[in-house]
Image (tube, grey):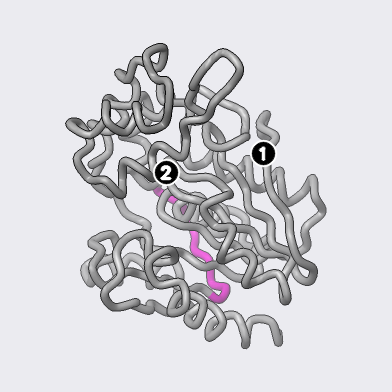
């Protein structure tokens, strides 16, 4: 049993659909996509542990994070939800589906494979931890201070969504220490017995390297009913870069699922 009670945002009505964000993200990142789904689904956007408004914890094992979501499903009495996860959230969704297949009606995995991935954000976490928050008077101050260590402006702005202002000054709403301590584990993927044979969609960005052709055999073995779609000229955050195309692939996959 998980000891984490996850924060979430709910919208819409209909069959349950759960959205799990990626590393450094939160439920707010998926607000626009969720809004487009609310006519057909009761959408639950979850903040995973150490992210958003959810509690902090020292460990970030995928088995534990999957149990967090399992407990959420049971606490809110969600019957056979559709699981949609991006990046880290996609790994959580895959682990949950394989370990507890009876709970999951269908699975959507966004730009991640059930394999070990690189840990390119270690230096970014270090930069965030080294930022002197006492000297930060505005978000602009933080962006300027981080520009040398995190030269990618879009990544910098994305990370700074986690910097929030309190009465005492700016604080991080992500648990940077836990992220740093668990970065190797977050790049990993656990060895799991069994498979998930329910309807499964993998959506990858054509310009992203997270789901490659060499990963397809592993995907087919663990998810024998899976289909893999590619959104051209899209990167890792394909749902933000190409929302129309992403929603098209989602609808194309979910329409027959909803009829079952």
Residue 195 falls inside the magenta stretch = yes
Q: Is residue 254 magenta?
A: no
Residue 10's place in the image compared with 7, above or below, is: below
Q: Residue 63 location in percent, x, y?
A: 52, 41
Which type of secondary structure does the marked residue at label 1 adopt? Answer: loop
Q: From the image, tell me which residue sits under label 1.
A: 6
| Residue where numbered disc 2 is placed | 23
Viewer-nearest residue: 75 or 13: 13
**Disc 2 element:** loop
Q: Bounds of the magenta span?
A: 191-199
Q: Residues within 10 Å of mark 2 (few under 14, many from 20)?
A: some
Which is the main secondary structure of the residues drawn in magenta? loop
Front-most of 100 and 54? 54
* Residue at horizontal 56 percent and vertical 41 percent from the top: 48
The answer to whether any part of residue 243 appears in the image is yes
Closer to the camera in the image, 195 or 135: 135
Q: Is residue 24 left or right of residue 149?
A: right
* Residue toward you, 239 or 83: 239
Locate residue 70, reporting x and y percent.
67, 48
The CA distance from mark 1 to mark 2 is 16 Å
């Amino acid at each position: 049993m998980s000891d984490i009670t996850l924060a979430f945002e709910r919208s819409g009505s209909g069959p349950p659909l759960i959205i799990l964000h990626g590393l450094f993200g939160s439920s707010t990142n998926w607000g626009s996509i969720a809004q487009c789904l609310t006519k057909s689904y009761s959408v639950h956007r979850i903040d995973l542990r150490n992210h958003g408004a959810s509690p902090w914890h020292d460990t970030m094992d995928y088995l534990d994070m999957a149990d967090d979501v399992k407990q959420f499903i049971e606490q809110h009495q969600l019957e056979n939800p559709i699981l949609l996860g991006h990046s880290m959230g996609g790994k959580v969704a895959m682990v949950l589906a394989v370990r507890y297949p009876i709970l999951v009606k269908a699975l959507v995995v966004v730009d991640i494979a059930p394999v070990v991935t690189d840990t390119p954000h270690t230096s970014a976490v270090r930069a965030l931890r080294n930022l002197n928050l006492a000297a930060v008077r505005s978000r602009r101050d933080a962006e300027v201070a981080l520009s040398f260590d995190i030269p990618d402006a879009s990544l910098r702005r994305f990370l700074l969504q986690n910097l929030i202002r309190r009465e005492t000054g700016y604080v991080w709403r992500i648990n940077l220490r836990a992220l740093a301590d668990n970065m190797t584990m977050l790049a990993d993927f656990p060895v799991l017995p069994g498979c998930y044979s329910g309807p499964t969609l993998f959506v990858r960005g054509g310009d992203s390297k997270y789901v490659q052709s060499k990963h397809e055999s592993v995907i087919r073995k663990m998810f024998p009913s899976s289909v893999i779609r590619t959104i051209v000229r899209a990167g890792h955050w394909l749902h933000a870069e190409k929302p129309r195309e992403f929603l098209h692939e989602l609808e194309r996959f979910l329409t027959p699922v909803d009829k079952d």
